[in-house]
Amino acid sequence: MGPISLYSGRHMKYCASPWNYSRRPTREVAVGDPARGGVVIGGGHPVVRQSMLTCDTMDTAACVQQTLDLVAVGCQIVRITAPTVKDAANLENVVAELHRRGCFVPIVADIHFKPDAAMEAVKWVEKIRVNPGNYADKKKFNVKEYTDAEYDAELQRVEESFVPLVLELKRLKRALRIGTNHGSLSDRIMNRFGDSPLGMVESALEFARICRKHDFHDFVFSMKSSNPKVMIECYRLLAARLSELGPDWNYQLHLGVTEAGEGEDGRIKSAIGIGSLLCDGIGDTIRVSLTEDSPNEIAVCNELLAQIPLLANTRARLGELPLPWDPFVYKRRESAESDLGDGVRGGGEQTVRVIVTRGTFDAVAPRIPAKSDVRPEGVYEDLNILELDPTQPIAPGTIPCATQWVTVKDGVALPTIAAFRLLAVRLKELGSANPILLKDCLSFEPVPLSPSVALLRAAVNLGSLLADGVGDAVLVRGESGGGLSLKLAYNILQAAGCRSFKTDYVACPSCGRTLFNLQTVTARIKARTDHLKGVKIAIMGCIVNGPGEMADADFGYVGGAPNKINLYVGKTPVKFNIPEGEAVDRLVDLIREHGKWVDADPANRTAELVA
């Protein structure tokens, strides 16, 4: 039975209102002692910020120092990997030294394949994270048809392995995160539900039912993916399913886009996924996963959380209106195709276009090479775009023709996301399929935004709407730099999966399992491959994240052993135990073998030319 017949998305509600901000009500779970450095997640408490250590778990001094560094910048929960029982046992030393230094931040042990490691770690830390896809379940990427009896027998085996941890968590008053990841589902779940949001939700609910059977409720869910659109669908579906199951299923949600990468791309992906859900009132704790030093993640968390009250509709109250799209299954809104001038067309089946202001065009157009993939595709002031106030119904005859481009009028008393959602409703009420130009903002600050804030705001506003399927072109005006605004628009479209103009990277953020320096290697791979338009490359520190969580990557660079790399095509390993010093060259060779390589064209280095 497929997902559509199991759950009809349109009759389920994933939040109280997609029009008016209201925080999703949840029960509380204490992680550690709140009177002594611990935190409470959920129950209306402020969203909690998390991060993860990148050092070897057996290096006590490094773990302690990295934890102190994170706490110093505002991290409230720190996660440490415990891949073996030996690593888990060393958490006793790490926690003891932190306490000796007066630091009582809650520690989470990250557990994957080994229940025995979880049973050791629970003695020493305040929280355990398990991945249902590989905790006592099978993940071999085998194709097997499970009978109902075989499926139930496997689930019973999982329960027998998981119950001892549940009982110990309850006895010691520890918390749990049930964290499913896209591409990291068990063979049993994959067989029945596919590598889908539905499969992720059902995998997590299986573990939740076991917890509830033993009256244990101090757990949090997460539904992570490196694809923001998939991540948003997963959390929406989970929130809707929990609501459907009843008011006592009001468990907290931990938000994150896994393997988001580094730099601007990592921040944009995280802002789209996390920001969209926070604006709808979903989310109780967040982690921004960057392939950078961990304190950088907290800086982004802080800035992102500061923007949400300004971007969510906390002010104007709108009536409850039917959504003109299915929030659980992505589909781009149907629109008429229309001319944008100079042979460029938008709307319909065309890719989402990039529009700029006249000032930006005059500043950057003379410096853009003729072959560049990053270029203005229309000038706002030249397009005769009809500006509408969606707070009022559109009167018949207001829009002159079906191909007229429309947008929201500046100064409308609504935040951007709510305004454009409402515009889509008004057009549907009118029976109109006019193409829509999205704007990243509808009003301007009295002083220019900092580049980091402009990036996050544009990513949340535009990315949320694009993930809803709304929008045929985008206009970025919050970023004051002409070249920067142009690049930001393209980067948001790439992160949202709307178009591909450069290589896409999926890079894990590093942890104690990592078998090479992720930041150094990622930079080396990007230097060789960042011109490969339409190619997705995954860079994974160990086999826990690869191959499964590489999801839809074309090629994978995965740590197989210390100083040894395995190369993948999709989820299939094809080259093994390559010395790290040779691995980037071998990756390039592999891309060539599969016909995806082109030589870099110096005339297309727009990134430098329009900076």
Image (cartoon, rainbow, N blue to C red):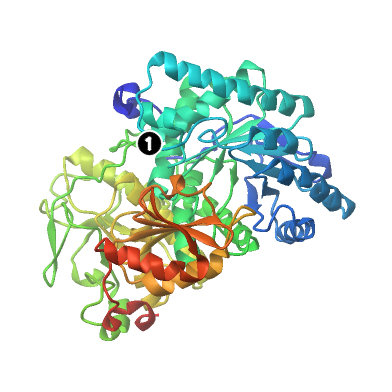
6 sits left or right of 26 in the view: left
Q: Is residue 259 above or below residue 114?
A: below
**In the figure, residue 18 lies in which quadrant?**
top left
Number of numbered discs: 1
Q: Residue at x 74, y 36 (%)?
A: 120
Image quadrant occupied by the C terminus: bottom left
Could you tell me which secondary element the residue under label 1 belongs to? loop
Q: Residue at x 42, y 67 (%)?
A: 478
Looking at the rendered structure, the kind of residue marked 1 is Ser
Image location of residue 354, percent across then percent down: 27, 65
Q: Residue at x 67, y 18 (%)?
A: 215
Image location of residue 362, percent across then percent down: 28, 82
**In the figure, residue 128 lies in which quadrant?**
top right
- Relative depth, front residue between 469 and 552: 552
Tag 1 residue = 196
Q: Is residue 449 above or below residue 87?
A: below
